Amino acid sequence: MEKRRQVKLEDVAALAGVSKTTVSRVLNNRGYLSETTKQRVHEAMEQLHYRPNAIARQLFTQKTNLVGLVFPTVNDPFFGQLEAGLDECLYENGYRTLMGNSQNNPQKEEQYLQLLLNHQIDGLIVGAHNQAMPDYLQTNLPIVSIERAVAPQIPVVASDNYRGGQLATQRLLDAGCQHIIHTNYPKDVMTTNQDRRKAYEDLMSQAGYPAITYEVNYDTPMEEKKAIFARLFDEHPEVDGIFADNDTNAGLIIQVAKARGRRVPEDLKVVGFDGADGTRILFPELTTVQQSIDQMAAVAVNLLEQQIAGQTNVESVTLPVTLLEGTTG
């Protein structure tokens, strides 16, 4: 059987009646071309079943149309919805995604950053909580951070976490709680979660009550988290309200409380933070502060595209939050 000859750029040019340069410009959307010319080229490509050489096109455009995503995990309602939203937005804008769930492993995050530095991806959207990544300070390449301060020149997309902390704490105060405890990351973890803690501390001080925060790392194993929450109840049997820094922790706290004979909300009121779609379906009774997760994804992609297009000094964006009323708070 005779081997089928590979269709080349000059074959498309000959059939369309244009030059190879014109075909290349159509493929890479460079320069002004009439709609008639574009149509002739595309019709010739379709007729010949021509498939552009992706590597050659990358060399011409200096773009890979690949964007790296680095987040702690997809095994979480908030991060799962966020990564799905980012992937959809990037696809709609002509990009494919390279996902890396770092489990807060700095080596994984460093590897993705090196891909960007080596021009193997066009940009990076990060949300892992690794500390002290010096390469972020030394690059002006397209990077957007979500809910994490990375470097002064890298824009951050975040919810209004201080306002969210106010809404959650005030909800518990309005419900008559006087012994409110908060859970959050350790203070040395540089995320916008710390704004939730600051709001809690400010409102508790204004109300004349002590502010007590139990520190829980995001990647702490589930059983260890439960042990921390059990200790919380042992050390503070008077607790009547808890502002959890995320909905997963809120759910675990309620599990531990019920196992110890505490009734929610009669004996203990709990307010979470995130309000992801999956959580709302599985745990609709949870009172929580809802972040605009899908909007967060769309804004992050928009900021990344601005940088890819060559814009500098792209500004950070803060998005509003809403208190969702449930029965637990």
Image (cartoon, rainbow, N blue to C red):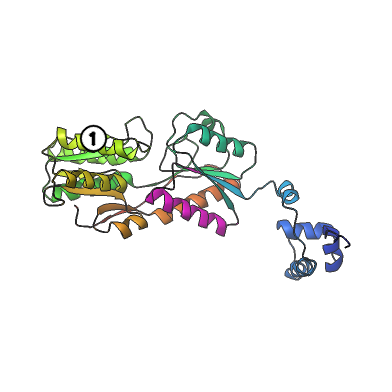
Tell me if 175 is positioned left or right of 275 in this view: left
Q: Residue at x 49, y 39 (%)?
A: 154
| Residue placed furthest toward the front | 1
Q: Position of residue 137 (x, y in %)?
A: 52, 31
User: Could you tell me if residue 30 is visible in this image?
Assistant: no
User: Is residue 44 one of those drawn in magenta?
Assistant: no
How busy is the neighbourhood of tag 1: few (under 14 within 10 Å), some, or many (20 plus)?
many
Nearer-the-camera pick, 244 or 227: 227
Residue 93 falls in image quadrant: bottom right
User: Could you tell me if residue 317 is visible in this image?
Assistant: yes
Q: Position of residue 87 (x, y in %)?
A: 52, 54
Nearer-the-camera pick, 32 or 209: 209
User: Is residue 80 one of those drawn in magenta?
Assistant: yes
**Amino acid type at mark 1:** Thr
Dot 1 falls on a residue whose secondary structure is strand
Tell me if 314 is positioned left or right of 249 in this view: right
Q: Residue at x 10, y 38 (%)?
A: 238
Tell me if 267 is positioned left or right of 57 in this view: left
Q: Position of residue 16 (x, y in %)?
A: 83, 68
Principal secondary structure, stretch drawn in magenta: helix
Classify 1 as above or below 275. Answer: below
Q: Residue at x 32, y 40 (%)?
A: 222
The residue under label 1 is 213
Q: Which residues are magenta?
A: 70-94
Q: Position of residue 221 (x, y in %)?
A: 35, 37
